[in-house]
Each structure stands twice: as structure tokens, then as C-alpha cells.
Amino acid sequence: MSAVATIKKKPAVICIGAGLAGLSAAYALKQKGYEVALLESRDRIGGRVFSHQITDQLVIELGGEWVGNSHSRIRELCGQFKLDLVNNQMNTHLIYKGTYAPAGSWDFSEAWNKKWDQLLKGYADLTDKDKQYLDQYDWWRYLVNNGCDGRDLEIKELLDSTDFGESIRQVSAFAALAEYAESSEKNEMDLKIKGGNQQLAIKLANAIGRENILLGCTVMKVDQADKVTITSADGRQFTADKLICAIPTFAMSKINWSPVLPPEKLQAINALQYARINKHAVLFKRRFWKEDGFDMVTDQLPHYFYHATKGQPGAEGVLISYSIGDKAAVVANQNDIMNARTIADTLQPLTKDAAYLIRKQVNYYWGNDAVSRGAYALYGPGQWFSLRPILSRPFKHVHFAGEHLADWQGFMEGAINTGEEAAFQIMS
């Protein structure tokens, strides 16, 4: 008597969101023979990865910028798709209380540097109870409690708020400590993809098949019964066995879910904030900052400058003014004339000619982004161990992905990791 083999049909999967999380999920499923489709509300792929051709020769990033040396998965994908990664490390200058200090000429106090090293080394010994305790209060309070004060505290605020996108009084002490203790010395600001980070999104989309990606398709309703039925804003319906929701929580909150998402998930979606980051790119006729790896943190409105065209040849170059929180909202509301004046005033220590060298300005304020209303997720005090597990939890046929569910927020690596994890949940 011979056994008859039965072939189980792999489920059809729809991914909402063609950012790196959705693209990575769809690519992983496609590689295993799953039928996959992506629905994207924007008119482009990439999501919060947003490369911009500011001149015929120069590309800048208005969205996700850095690839860390420890970001193993994105580096593997770049190798697989033959995308070159180039050095993007910077040497940080400082403007503080009207005084300019070149890179290498300023530092924290010896006492704070010693204490900081102790805190980072001590992270490995923290128990789960210790971590949950740290999560109950903010990063500013943690620093103060550990002896950071005066100039050290003010400069730490400038630097760390650049990482988190809002004041350090708004971020969980545990989330902040974990990121610094587990990351590289440069805090994963190491590399970028030659030709623009969006090159990876393009490669993934091509591998998935452009015919399987529908742009300009805003999901309005998700019905779950034996299958999942998705209804778009223009009335089209799509049916699948499984759904991966790879969009920011703001966009998620706009969907009519049937059955309704669990109360704790709805609460978590509404509670999570995203950083208000503004990127103001200024194209200058010449690179007066001289050093290719130039960046500078300031206590002024432009907040943080970095050379956005590092490694790209040409006389012209771009500095991006990267502002956060309330500063970002103010900068975003000014016209180019006002912003050019502020930027030129701040850059006075480097050149008196900044205003005359400006050729073009491009601004993008993530706080007003129609899909995300922010650049990346920010876990506040008491949220890391409460919100994140709830947001990660599948609901019926729906699995969730996105940088807000990653170990660290704000990195392309995290989006990829969570997208692939959602795909693996469906495969298992």
C-alpha cells in the first residue's frame, strides 16, 4: 500500500507598507515560494527611507541615514544585491554658549567620562528587575542621578536628543541606556549605501516583482474571518490568508479593524509617540567645512549639522541641519529666507560667507508626514516593557512589523529585522 503525499498550498500574504519592514517581509516570503502582494499608500517605495537627488551628481537622505557596523542583516542584503557600503563616520565639532570648538578639542569632564564608562560596563550586570525599574523614569533623571550636571549635562542633552529625536526628558532611561550600551562607539553612525539608501528598497522591490506592489493604495479597512479582506480608500478589495501590517502606529490607528483590535493594543497604538525630526538640506557652492567627515552639534536652533554628501565628488556639497522636537517644529514653519539666515548665523565660526554660498534648500519635516507623523518611535518612561510586547503581538491572521518593534528605534536594520521576523512567524 503506497502512501499518497499531500501538498499543502502556501498561504497568500498581503503586506501593508512598502518601507523596509514590509519589503523585507515580502522578500523573505517570496524566496520561500509564497504568493505575496504589497499595498503602499505613498506614491513611492521605501517608506521612511527617502533618498533625494539634490543635483545631477549629489544624493542626500531625507529619511533613514546610517548603517551601523553591527547591523549584520542590512549589510548581508547589501552584499547579496551588490550594493556598496561606504564610510559615513563623522568627527564632531561643537558650538556651546557662543564658543566654537573643533573636533578633538572638546570633551566631557574627566569625572563624567569615568562615570559614563562605569555605567556602560555595568549594563551587563543589570537584572530584569533592574531594567524594569529603569524603564519607569526618564533619561535626563537617570543622568542627573548618576552625577551628570552643568556643562556635561547640557552637552549630553544636545547629543542624546539628536539620537532620540526629542528631549531626553521624554525617553525611557532603560531604552536609552540599552541603545548606548549595546551599540558601537560611533552609536551605529558608520556607513551608508552608495548612491542612496533607497537603492536597497529598489533591489528588494525588483526581487519581489513590481507587479506585486501597488502604490497609492491606502488601506481603510481590515476584516478578519476565515481569511483577511482589505479594503482600500478607492473601494478595491484584496483577500489573503495572512496579513503583515508593517506601517507606523499613526497609520495603523486610521484603519477600521473588524473585529476591533484588543483594547490593550489600541491603547498602545495611541500611546506611542514618534520623534519630530526636521531635515533641512542646504546645498552650498563650495565645501567650506573642509573636512569630509564633518558634523557639528550646536545649542542653537539648527541643532545638528552633518556633511550629507560625504564621499561624493564635486565642489558643491550639502550640509543637513537636523533639528529635533520643538526646534524641528519651529524650523519647519519658517521659509527658506529665515532658515538660510539662521543657518548662516550659526555657521559664522566656519565661514562668514555661508549666506552667499547657498544655492538651494530642501526641507522635510517628519512631524507632519501624512503616514507616520514622526521619524521613528520614541518609547517614553514606563513604555518599553508595557507597550512594545503588546504592539508586537499578532492578532488573529495579522502579524506586525516596523522599526517601532525593533531592539533599537530609528534604524533601517530594525525595520528589516522585524519584517523578516513577521515573515518567519507565518512560515513556521
Image: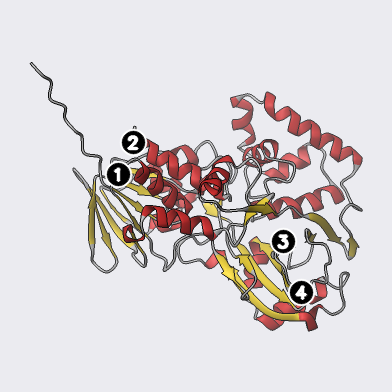
Residue 300 coordinates in the image, percent (x, y)? 78, 66
**Considering only order in the chain, which callout, 2 or 4, is on the residue closer to the N terminus?**
4
Contact (CB < 8 A) between labels 1 and 4? no
Tell me: 77 left or right of 283: left
Q: Residue at x 28, y 57 (%)?
A: 221
Determine crowd level at label 2: few under 14, some 14-19, many 20+ residues with C-alpha closer than 10 A.
few
Q: Quadrant of residue 197?
A: bottom right
Determine crowd level at label 4: few under 14, some 14-19, many 20+ residues with C-alpha closer than 10 A.
few
Q: Amino acid at mark 4?
A: Ala
Q: Nearer the viewer, mark 2 or mark 1?
A: 1
Helix, strand or loop status at disc 2: helix
Determine crowd level at label 3: few under 14, some 14-19, many 20+ residues with C-alpha closer than 10 A.
few
Residue extending farthest to the left is: 1
Residue 351 coordinates in the image, percent (x, y)? 87, 74
Q: Which label number is shown at residue 311?
A: 3
**Considering only order in the chain, which callout, 2 or 3, is on the residue closer to the N terminus?**
3
Residue holding disc 2: 427
Residue 318 coordinates in the image, percent (x, y)? 71, 70
Q: Nearer the viewer, mark 3 or mark 2?
A: 3
**Considering only order in the chain, which callout, 1 or 3, is on the residue closer to the N terminus?**
1
Q: Residue at x 62, y 31 (%)?
A: 131
Q: Amino acid at mark 1?
A: Tyr
Residue holding disc 4: 315
Residue 135 coordinates in the image, percent (x, y)? 61, 37
Q: Amino acid at mark 3?
A: Gly
Q: Label 4 to label 2, Cα distance in Å?
A: 51 Å
Residue holding disc 1: 34
416 or 314: nearer the viewer: 314
Determine crowd level at label 1: few under 14, some 14-19, many 20+ residues with C-alpha closer than 10 A.
some
Q: Label 1 to label 4, Cα distance in Å?
A: 48 Å
